[in-house]
Amino acid sequence: MKRRDIGKYGICSLSAIPVRMKPDRSSTLLTQILFGEYVEVLSVKNKHWIKVICLYDQVVGWVDPKQILFLSTDFDPAVSIDYGVSLEVVQPAYHKDYSIPIPIASSLPYFDGISFYLDKKKFSFSGQAIRQTDDLVHPDLFIKVLRRFLTAPESAGGRTVFGLDSSAMVQLIFKIFHIALPRLAQHQIEFGRAISFHHEMALGDLAFFENKQGLINHVGIVYGPKKIIHIHGHARIDKLDQNGIFNIDERRYTHKLRIIQRMDHFIDFDILGALHDS
């Protein structure tokens, strides 16, 4: 690939592509870019590697330029683009005589409910997706989305239901509802407001955990009264109390609780309260 073929901006036109720490296929996987997410090219090493910043969450790393669809020079990332976010675990999108598997939480540019556009190509999409329309999330829909991640295998740096880490799962679930969070748990903790008492935690709250050095190393989502969905070997539901996560299978605490954060105006808590009271 020649330097002139590489534009300043690009989009992921495949299901998901790896972002490496170094320009080496054996290098650490930092994250993955999902279908429909944009990147800005920072530098070009050779025909095999370019350094990019992921525009969704500002992660910087190295990708294979052959896996990026480069956009025309008139693309402006500052211009807001209406898009949907896929709700399906995996769903094909069709363009003429080929299809692309679209994993959950992928972006669908210019989605109108039945189709979207990728670099002026029209794709049909028959699955469910959420557009930027609702300010609040109904608890029933939120729980439905949480359950779609259950049993997803743990994979450091991964960002799909076929392999992901704890902070990626949290980021993707909130992305589905058009709430942007950083890629890493130590940055996600800066969002929302702290819950004073653990017994006040509610569906959708973020629970953060620390290691022996006091550093944030894990995050999960409050699933219900004294329950959490998180990644430990795979996405699972465990017990949660003021001490941390109690693993039902291992019969021990696996993660020490640091703090619980609430994303205000995210879930319709009036509805949630009515459900709890019923």
Image: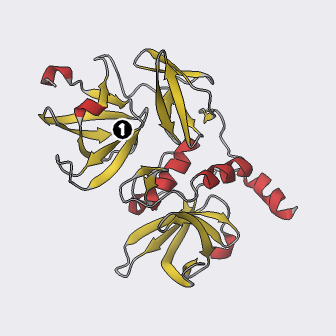
Where's residue 124, x and y in %?
A: 56, 21
Q: Write the residue at 32% across / 47% down.
A: 59
* Figure quadrant of the C terminus: bottom right
Residue 72 seen in the figure:
yes
Q: In the displayed structure, would residue 62 be above or below residue 245? A: above
> Horizontally, is 112 left or right of 17 in the view?
right
Q: In the displayed structure, would residue 192 be above or below residue 122? A: below
Q: Residue furthest bottom?
A: 252
Q: Write the residue at 49% across / 35% down.
A: 102
Q: Write the residue at 21% across / 48% down.
A: 25
Q: Write the residue at 83% across / 57% down.
A: 274
* Figure quadrant of the N terminus: top left
Q: Residue furthest left?
A: 46
> Horizontally, is 149 left or right of 48 in the view?
right
Which residue is disc 1 drawn over? 55
Q: In the displayed structure, would residue 140 be above or below residue 193? A: above
Pick the front one: 77 or 104 = 104
> Horizontally, is 122 left or right of 60 in the view?
right
Number of numbered markers: 1
Q: Secondary structure at mark 1?
A: loop
Where's residue 34, x and y in %?
A: 42, 39
Quadrant position of residue 197: bottom right
How many other residues sit within 10 Å of disc 1, few (<14), some (14-19) or many (≥20)?
some
Pick the front one: 149 or 166 = 149
Q: Residue furthest right?
A: 278
Instruction: State the scheme by which the image is colored.
Output: secondary structure
Residue type indicated by callout 1? Leu
Where's residue 196, x and y in %?
A: 61, 73
> Horizontally, is 35 left or right of 125 in the view?
left
Residue 196 seen in the figure:
no
Where's residue 61, x and y in %?
A: 25, 46
